Image (cartoon, rainbow, N blue to C red):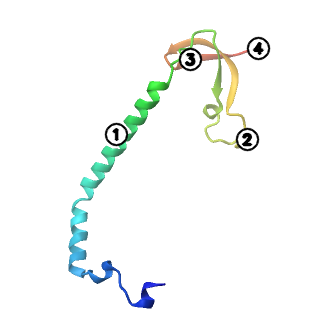
Amino acid sequence: MILMEIGVQSPRVVHFSEENNEEGLRNLLDLVDELRDKAAIKVTTYQQRVSRYYNKRVKPRPLMEGDLVLRNSAITDPTSTRGKLAPNWEGPYKVKRVLRPGIFKLETLGI
């Protein structure tokens, strides 16, 4: 049964007043910056928790010269012009030199 059929109005409609509504909206506008700051803090703490959870379980694997690796194909084709059925990885490549942790000179294998 629909409320209109039996003539019962909701409490929101019964207690509505234009003055209180506008005053409440002005109060909310005053608090917008504070609410945004609280939301940013919540997002930051959530990201830190997720990062800590992930970092507890990840095992770093340092690469040495001579190791065989695969290269992410999104690096060579950032515009994704090859389509979604293209392979995600290229290689194998051999690590020629370690410049810094995470940065390597690669050479192709003569296959």
**For the residue labelled by badge 3, is the local secondary structure a helix, a strand or a loop?**
strand
Q: Which of 34 and 10 is in front in this view?
A: 10
* Sooner in the amino-acid sequence: mark 2 or mark 1: 1
From the image, which quarter does the C terminus lie in? top right
Residue designated by label 1: 45
Q: Are marks 2 and 4 in contact (CB under 8 Å)?
A: no
Residue designated by label 4: 110
Mark 3–mark 4 distance (CA, rounded to whole Å): 19 Å
* Sooner in the amino-acid sequence: mark 2 or mark 4: 2
Kindly identify the amino acid type of the residue bearing the numbered disc 1.
Thr
Residue designated by label 3: 104
Mark 3–mark 2 distance (CA, rounded to whole Å): 28 Å
Which dot, 1 or 3, sits closer to the camera?
A: 1
- Give me the residue at 21% from left, 79% from top: 19
Query: In the figure, residue 69 lies in which quadrant?
Result: top right
Crowd class of label 2 (few under 14; some 14 to 19; many from 20; radius 10 Å): few
Mark 2–mark 4 distance (CA, rounded to whole Å): 26 Å
Which dot, 2 or 1, sits closer to the camera?
A: 1
Q: Where is residue 56 in the image (x, y as percent from the top left)?
A: 44, 25
Query: In the figure, residue 6 lies in which quadrant?
Result: bottom left
Mark 1–mark 3 distance (CA, rounded to whole Å): 33 Å
Kindly identify the amino acid type of the residue bearing the numbered disc 4.
Gly
* Sooner in the amino-acid sequence: mark 3 or mark 4: 3
